[in-house]
Amino acid sequence: MVKNKKQLQQKTKKTNVQKPARKTFFVYYIFIFLIAFVAYANTFKHGYVLDDFSVIKENFVVKQGTAGISTILKTGYRYGYWNSPDNLYRPLPLIMYAIEWQLWPDNPTPGHVINVLLFGLLCVLLFKLLQKLFAGYSVLLPMMATLIFALHPIHTEVVANIKSRDEIMAFLFSIGSILLLLSYSEKKSTLKLISALFIYLLALLSKESAITFLAIIPFLFYFFYDKKKKSAAFLTVFYLIPVLIFFAMRYRAIGNQAHLDETSMVDNLLVAAPDFFTRTATAIKIMGLYLWKLMVPYPLACDYSYNQIKIVSFGDFYVLISLFVYIGLAVIAFLGFKKKSVLSFSVLFYFISMSIYSNLIITIGSSFGERFLFVPSFAFALALAYLITKLFGMLQKEINLNQLFTSKVFLTLLPLFIIYIGITMSRNKDWKSSLSLYEADINKSPESAHMNYYYGLEIMKGKAMENGEVTKPKYLDTAIFYFRRARTIVPSFADAYDQLGLAYFRKNEWDKALAYYDTCLTLAPGKSITYSNMGVIYFQNKQYDKALAAYENAVRFDPKFSDGWMNLGSTYGTLGKYNEAIAAFKKCIEYNPQNAMAYYFIGITYQNLGDPSNASYFLNQAYALNPSLKGKQ
């Protein structure tokens, strides 16, 4: 009898509120899009930041433009930047970056604009999905949930960083696929089912974390559709088709390389945990930090790596608090499951979407990242909007467009929206450049080895140097301070020793530089850039044989290292080995087609060989790329 009563209440909910006119919803869509757009419009003039360099600006495949698309489809995510095995396969964002480079080479502005446009579109689709799921509720619930999501400051790392478009695209395509699937369940159009599966494949090709929606979709049908439509949940079996296609494409491109990619403790502090229990306790503590950042998104930082978050045991206070909270959430999900509670669905959505980043199931390449909350934050937004709307008894109150923004629910959330947009727009400014970002964040994560290392790197590159020359030597000492701090935090941090060597080289203290390079190679024997840096010192000391050996090692360990090939070619040329020099310069061009100096040196070398025809061809190629070289001879 109780069961029938609940069913009657559910049916009543779906007829209490008259569905707003299509024109009204169109106004809502425009409003939501504009809110998201305005919140991030101050990122349009920003530069490349953080991983933008490895994925776009210094990625030789992406810089080939549309010509590199076939290579992108056949290789791992970072193939165009480093020589290490890669267990990530995300071709769709890379294809977009390649097209953008083709249209607007070395111009980050279009990339930032596209990020914001896609984020705005995502927010509109989320509202549309909530509109469908809560068709029997007041429009207040989907609108407030969408606004909380759109304005939440935790998204700044994703929207303000071009590389993190993979997060936006994966979520966008997943929601688009769900909308098409819901439409199919209502109208039985085979085209819509095929489209839903294809769009989901695009989500997987954007970022593999979209696979969590394979578990979310059945719950969505269970919680929000009656028995007649609930059978459509079995349609998710068809979603195995795009999953299998994705894994087939991934295997073809990179094979089974997961075991080859060893995670460093510098990237994921959990690697440093001495045992399983300590590792699990620390992971639980980090999961608590994720919840805290959702509730209090301030301060925000781009890095929380070793040793900013401490490794702890199960006796730690924060571990116990986190464990208690998560057990409480699990109880809410369990108790509300049969009742099809919105809070139960929200908790399950959070658990499922967060599982891939928890480090409890698998160890990923990072211990903590604000970007990992991009999808899970939707559950937080939905739960908060539901609780406040229910508190005021307005879940089923019919309101028009004008009443929406004068309602108690909106006015209650308005201070939160103002705080959110203030933090978001302020945080966006930090993402203007890598230097501005680390300047803003170094005091938020002072014990992070990564933070100190990267801040030192940006000080040396952005303050001490100008056009490749040291103009403000005092900043070299500042950079050295941060490199040493990074080394102190993680004594085995090879990159810190490499940059200490480079800093001392630029201070003309070459013996110290070589000592740091030797230490770096002891810790990381295959580090190509270090061999190349040592080669520069040997070359300038006219120790050409040692320079040659160093450069040969550089390209041996990283055959795609264009600067290494360039330096090797110069050394061969100096030693009078012209044919070897030409071969090395051509390898440089293979991985950096825009290197005018490589074309120029090939032309000069052909002149030395008495081959005017080839000399003229390559010199003209050099002049086309850099006209200022014409007066260099």
Image (tube, grey):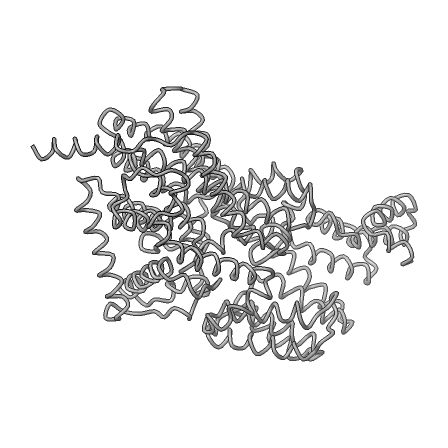
Q: Is residue 239 above or below residue 82?
A: above
**Which residue corresponds to the image point at 20% horizontal and 42% vertical from the top-left?**
337
Q: Position of residue 517 (x, y in %)?
A: 61, 72
Q: Quick one: quadrant of the N terminus?
A: top left
- Residue appearing at x 33%, y 43% in the figure: 141
**Can the viewer see residue 192?**
yes
Q: Is residue 475 above or below residue 35?
A: below
In which quadrant of the rendered view does residue 178 lie? top left
Q: Position of residue 432 (x, y in %)?
A: 60, 60
Whether residue 200 appears in this view of the structure is no
592 is higher (above) or lower (below) than 228: below
As rendered, which of 43 and 614 lies closer to the eye? Answer: 43
Return the x and y of residue 224 as percentages of the image width and height.
27, 35
Looking at the picture, tell me which residue is in the foreground, 267 or 301.
Answer: 301
Q: How many marks?
A: 0
Query: In which quadrant of the rendered image does the C terminus lie?
Result: bottom right
- Quadrant for residue 45, please give it: bottom right
